[in-house]
C-alpha cells in the first residue's frame, strides 16, 4: 500500500483530540502525518500558551528532527551547554554536561519560551479542524460510537477519543472517575525577563537552599526563564512579586544580577502549587490519555512536556504498524514503564530538594558533592535518553 492510499483509507475514522496544549497539538501533528483527520477541541476561547520557559532535552530534539520541526524550534530556542546544581551561596553541588550529549547524539538540549513551542506546533497542523470553546462535559458510548457532549450544547459522534487536556483532565474524570492529585508540598512562581549581559546564555542552573529553590534558564531571544519554589506553609498565593523576590534574597551569584535589574511592575509572575497524578492511567476502550492527563509529573526533571511529546510520537509509531484499535491497546505497554520512571524520579528529587531539617540538608549537599561527575552524568543520560 502506498502512502497516499493509506492516507485515503484513514479519512473515515472519526478521532477527537481533547486539549490544545503541547501534547494535544503534537498528537494531531502525528496523526495528520499518517493521513488521519482528527478534530481537536479546546475548552478555552483561545489556544493559550500558559507558562513561561520550557526545557526540551535530546529526547525531544530527536523527535522534532524526525518530524521536521527542529529547524523552526532552533530559530527561537537557546541551546544549553550545561545544567549546574548549586547551593544558595553559588557553590557547586554537581553538574550535567549537555554538550557531551549533543556531541554523542547530535541532538542538543534547548530552552525556549513556551509560546514559541506552541506557535510551532499550531503551524504544523490543520487549523481548520481546531474548535475552541468546546469543553467536554459528558461521553456516552452507543454501538461502539462515542457521543460527546460539550458545554456549548453541541453533541458530536466520534469513533476514538484522545485525552490531552492536562493535569485536571475532564476526559480522565469521565472515563476513570476522580483520581486524586498528589500534593508535592511546595509551590512555584515563574517569570521571564530580559537576560542580563553579564550572564552566560548557554549555561543554566538550579540552586538549592533551605526549603527553597531557584532556577535560571536562558531561553533565547534575549530572555531568561526563572522559577522559584518553596515548601508550602500557607499564604503563598497572597504574596506579591516584591515579597516573593525578597523571600529568595539569600541566593547569590546570577540570581542577584537578575533580581536587581528586574522590573516587577511590568513582568508577569505566574504562581501555582505543584502536584502530580497519584495513579497513572493511559487507556480504556477506544480512548487513550496523552501527557499530563494520564501521567502528570512534578517538574523536577524538566520532562513534563517531553513526556507528552514522546507519547504522541510513540502512538504515531504504533499506528504505522497497527490499526487504531490495536495501537490504543498497545499504547500503555509502550509508555507505562517510561512515564512511571520519570514521575517517580522527579518526585524523589523534589523530596530531596525540600528536606526540612538543616542537618539533613547539609548531609544531602555533602553527599551530592561526593558523587563523581561521571556517575551523575551516566544517570542523567540514562533517564533523559531512556537508555
Image (cartoon, rainbow, N blue to C red):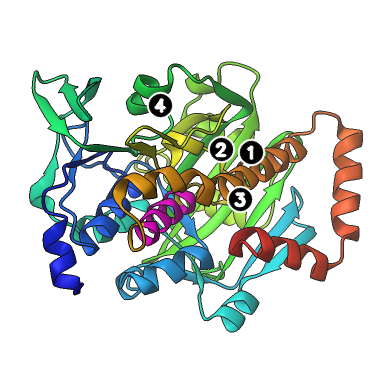
Disc 2 target residue: 245
Residue shown at 17% from the left, 24% from the top: 147
Q: Residues within 10 Å of mark 3 (few under 14, many from 20)?
A: some
Q: SS class of the residue under badge 1? A: loop
Between the residue at mark 1 and the residue at mark 4, the CA separation in whole angstroms equals 30 Å
Above or below: residue 124 compared with residue 168: below
The quadrant holding residue 235 is: top right
Of the image marks 3 and 2, the number of the one nearer the N terminus: 2
Of the image marks 4 and 2, the number of the one nearer the N terminus: 4
Between the residue at mark 4 and the residue at mark 2, the CA separation in whole angstroms equals 29 Å
Query: Do labels 3 and 1 touch, CB within 8 Å?
Result: no
Residue shown at 60% from the left, 37% from the top: 229
Of the image marks 1 and 4, the number of the one nearer the N terminus: 4
Q: How many labels, in total?
A: 4
Disc 1 target residue: 248
Query: Do labels 2 and 1 touch, CB within 8 Å?
Result: yes
Disc 4 target residue: 168
Disc 3 target residue: 301
Which one is in front in this view, the residue at disc 3 or the one at disc 4? 4
Closer to us: 183 or 252 = 183
Residue 115 visible from this viewpoint: yes
Q: Residues within 10 Å of mark 4 (few under 14, many from 20)?
A: some
Amino acid at each position: 500500500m502506498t502512502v497516499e492510499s493509506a492516507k485515503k483509507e484513514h479519512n473515515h475514522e472519526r478521532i477527537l483530540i481533547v486539549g490544545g496544549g503541547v501534547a494535544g497539538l503534537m498528537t494531531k501533528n502525528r496523526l495528520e502525518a499518517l493521513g488521519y483527520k482528527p478534530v481537536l477541541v479546546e475548552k478555552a476561547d483561545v489556544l493559550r500558551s500558559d507558562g513561561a520557559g520550557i526545557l526540551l532535552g535530546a529526547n525531544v530534539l530527536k523527535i522534532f528532527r524526525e518530524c521536521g520541526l527542529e529547524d523552526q524550534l532552533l530559530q527561537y530556542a537557546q541551546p544549553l551547554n550545561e545544567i549546574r546544581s548549586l547551593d544558595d551561596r553559588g557553590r557547586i553541588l554537581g553538574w550535567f554536561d549537555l554538550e557531551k550529549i549533543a556531541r554523542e547524539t547530535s541532538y542538543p538540549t534547548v530552552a525556549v519560551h513556551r509560546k514559541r513551542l506552541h506557535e510551532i506546533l499550531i503551524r504544523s497542523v490543520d487549523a481548520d479542524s481546531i474548535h475552541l470553546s468546546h469543553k467536554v462535559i459528558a461521553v456516552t458510548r452507543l454501538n461502539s460510537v462515542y457521543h460527546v457532549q460539550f458545554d456549548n450544547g453541541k453533541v458530536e459522534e466520534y469513533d476514538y477519543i484522545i485525552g490531552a487536556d492536562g493535569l485536571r483532565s475532564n476526559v480522565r474524570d469521565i472515563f476513570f472517575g476522580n483520581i486524586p492529585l498528589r500534593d508535592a508540598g511546595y509551590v512555584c512562581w515563574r517569570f521571564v525577563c530580559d537576560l542580563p549581559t553579564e550572564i552566560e546564555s548557554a549555561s543554566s542552573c538550579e540552586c538549592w537552599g533551605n526549603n527553597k529553590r531557584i532556577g535560571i534558564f536562558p531561553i533565547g531571544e534575549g530572555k531568561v526563564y526563572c522559577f522559584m519554589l518553596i515548601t508550602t506553609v500557607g499564604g503563598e498565593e497572597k504574596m506579591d512579586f516584591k515579597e516573593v523576590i525578597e523571600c529568595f534574597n539569600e541566593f547569590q551569584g546570577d540570581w542577584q544580577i537578575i533580581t536587581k535589574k528586574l522590573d516587577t511592575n511590568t513582568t508577569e509572575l505566574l504562581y501555582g502549587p505543584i502536584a502530580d497524578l497519584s495513579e497513572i492511567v493511559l487507556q480504556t476502550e477506544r480512548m487513550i490519555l496523552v501527557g499530563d492527563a494520564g501521567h502528570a509529573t512534578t517538574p523536577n526533571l524538566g520532562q513534563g512536556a517531553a513526556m507528552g511529546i514522546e507519547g504522541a510520537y510513540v502512538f504515531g509509531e504504533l499506528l504505522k504498524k497497527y490499526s487504531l484499535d490495536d495501537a490504543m491497546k498497545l499504547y500503555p505497554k509502550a509508555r507505562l514503564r517510561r512515564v512511571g520512571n520519570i514521575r517517580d524520579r522527579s518526585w524523589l528529587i523534589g523530596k530531596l530538594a525540600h528536606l526540612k531539617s538543616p542537618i539533613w540538608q547539609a548531609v544531602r549537599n555533602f553527599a551530592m558533592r561526593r558523587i563523581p561527575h561521571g556517575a551523575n552524568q551516566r544517570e542523567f543520560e540514562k533517564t533523559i535518553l531512556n537508555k
